[in-house]
Amino acid sequence: MLDDTDNKLSQGNYALTVIIAEEMATANLRDIFAQLQPENYPSVEFLVCSGRDRSMLDGVPDRQNVRIIRAHADSRIPLLWRDGIRAALADKVALTTAHCVPSQSWIKQLLAYPLEGKQVAVGGAIENVENDTTVGRVIYLLRYVRYTKSRPSGRVDDLAADNALYRKADILAHDDLLEIGFWEPSFHARFLAEGKTLQFDNELLVVHKNCYGIKQFMRQRYSHGIEFGMARAKVMSLTKRLAMIALSPLIPLVFTRKIMATARCDKQFDLGLNRDMFWLLVFVLAWSVGETVGYIKTVGYIKKEETKS
């Protein structure tokens, strides 16, 4: 197993780089690599991007085609993906997190996608582990309700980067976005504006196996909300940013209604919604407060920029 601080890195011509962002999910690493079986895929590079010391990543196998990319201790998943994308040696990169365990056919499926012409990305389905806890079930509902196997395969406007394949060059072409992390909604919007296409394949499967505790996930939602609000605000005028701040009390309502509307279309979510509603609202509120803080943080910056111009 190679670390990014080692001088000698593998210089093989890899067909694919798999990037696993590890944030508070070391417990899943052994199961993940049992499914990935890197020993059977010498043409595939595997990167584990984590803010943890390597001594805490004992589930990562010691192999020539497996590397650990060490990040700052407080790095969130989009920043971990960014570091992995920049370090990848292959032209195609597959993204996931240590909260998702892939199917045994995952690597073979990824290798089969050509990603030619206008097609810039392929994303897959995310199912939840059986007999999950209430918190794990709610986190799955909050994050992946739009990406279950019941979603039809075909061209789409959005994908979950937790189970997606991209052409690396298309991502690197937008370094202004990548600098603050790989936030897939921003990249997808750019790709679509360029006339490129996204594909969803419900047979490309990973299983969500949550490792976050309640406080950990609340902090994650809050900090992600801040980053999202700041990234979104950068393309808004000052007037629109101020309007978003004024309307921010509506964010939890809008967000929750969208989740519930999508969930009602999928039979697997019919049971337990009322029982899980409390934690759903708590997590949505944490995100919403963070998003509002993100808008507020950019107001002063925009005023300075407008003064300069």
Image (cartoon, rainbow, N blue to C red):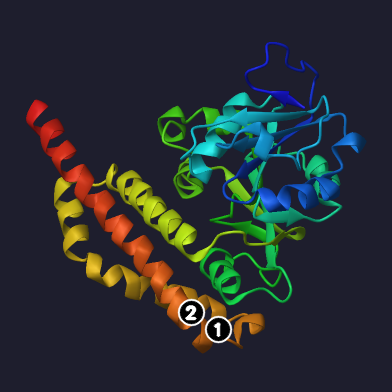
**Residue 110: percent from the left, percent from the top?**
78, 44
Q: Quadrant of the C terminus?
A: top left
Which residue is found at the position 81% from the left and 40% from the top? 111
The kind of residue tagged 2 is Met
Q: Quadrant of the N terminus?
A: top right
- Residue 264 is labelled as 1
Q: Secondary structure at mark 1?
A: helix
Q: Is residue 123 visible?
A: yes
The answer to whether residue 292 is above or below residue 22 is below
Q: Residue furthest left?
A: 307
The kind of residue tagged 1 is Arg
What crowding class fits label 1: few (fewer than 14 Cα within 10 Å), some (14-19), or many (20 or more)?
A: some
The one nearer the camera, 252 or 201, is 252
Which residue is found at the position 65% from the left and 84% from the top? 267
Which residue is found at the position 66% from the left and 39% from the top? 56
Q: Are marks 2 and 1 in contact (CB under 8 Å)?
A: yes
The answer to whether residue 220 is above or below residue 4 is below
The one nearer the camera, 67 or 176, is 67
The answer to whether residue 149 is above or below residue 173 is below
